[in-house]
Amino acid sequence: MSVRLRWLGHACFEIVLPSGKVLVAEPFLDLSPTAPIRSQEVTGADYITISHGAFSAVADVGSLAHRFNSKVVCSYQVGPLLARFFDFDAANLVRVTAGTTITFDDLTIEVRKAEHNSMLEWAKIQYQLFMGKEASPGMSIKELRGALPPHPLLTPQIVELIDKLKAAGIEGQYSGSGGIVHSDEQLDYVLHTSDNLRIYLFFGGPHQFSHQEIRQSRANVIIAHLGGNDPLKMAEVAALSGAEVVIPCCHDLRGNDMARKLVEVMSGALAVRAKSYFLDIVPGKWYEIGARVSAL
């Protein structure tokens, strides 16, 4: 009962299933400042899962779908828009909604309800970690971000992509309160492999409703969207899952110091709540994940 996987920066993972087929989650490589490889170096992409229409979840779906004739699992709303924008065969779309289950020969995917993290709350967390003090009440997201170093993701190429995705109705819009409003439904996925390993791709925020979703998941492994979320709340969610292995992601965009702080807070809080193995994953390194965790 095991898979091989490697973290490709942000929320992108390459997962080799027991069948030998490959699933790529959140394909964001060629423009990613933290990706250890580029899309041409991915070994396969029989399946692609997309949680929502953000640039960091979809940027390389086109190149991978063309190269591997991938099945692209995504929401009903965003699917046709992606196929049109990236010019891949719409027949390869597997359009889903929360609560549904999709079965392939070697893999079952359970689709779970999710919701994006609060960008305002994330800005407050970053402010506290960078400045060593809590943000003043009433600080706007613009004020909070103004106190932080420039975001490494906002390169001219990525800003151009975001603008194009917004014009196509794919990329979400920010609300005045710091939330994000997407034109599609945000989704999480539980991957159930042919040898009975259950991997929860938990890429939404730790909202109250997600507690029930996570309890019902029966996950052996949870890949948790640490960056963008409160690490204490993410530790709580991971503990509720009962997963034997917890793997953080998305905590790599603000430099090593920020990444270390987030990992230390989450792993420390998790150790108090559960006996899960917290994998301090290294980008680009292959791991075998199952009853044990082994670096390859």
Image: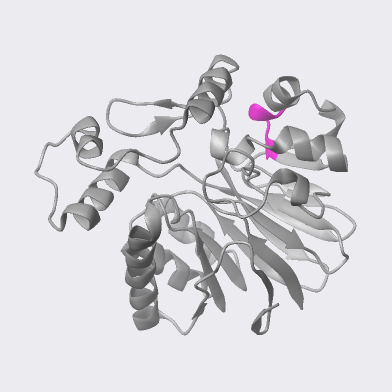
Relative image position of residue 200 (x, y in whole percent) = 60, 61
Residue at 81% over, 27% down = 88
The answer to whether residue 61 is magenta is no
Establish if 233 lies above or below 274: above
Relative image position of residue 74 (x, y in whole percent) = 68, 38
Given residues 169 and 281, the one toward you in this image is 281
Establish if 61 lies above or below 241: above
Residue at 63% over, 35% down = 59
Q: Quadrant of the C terminus?
A: bottom right
Residue at 66% over, 63% down = 6
**Bounds of the magenta segment:** 74-79
Among the 4 quarters of the image, the one containing residue 150: top left
Given residues 81 and 108, the one toward you in this image is 81
Relative image position of residue 137 (x, y in whole percent) = 10, 42
Residue at 31% over, 47% down = 122
- Judged from this view, the residue extending furthest toward the left is 136
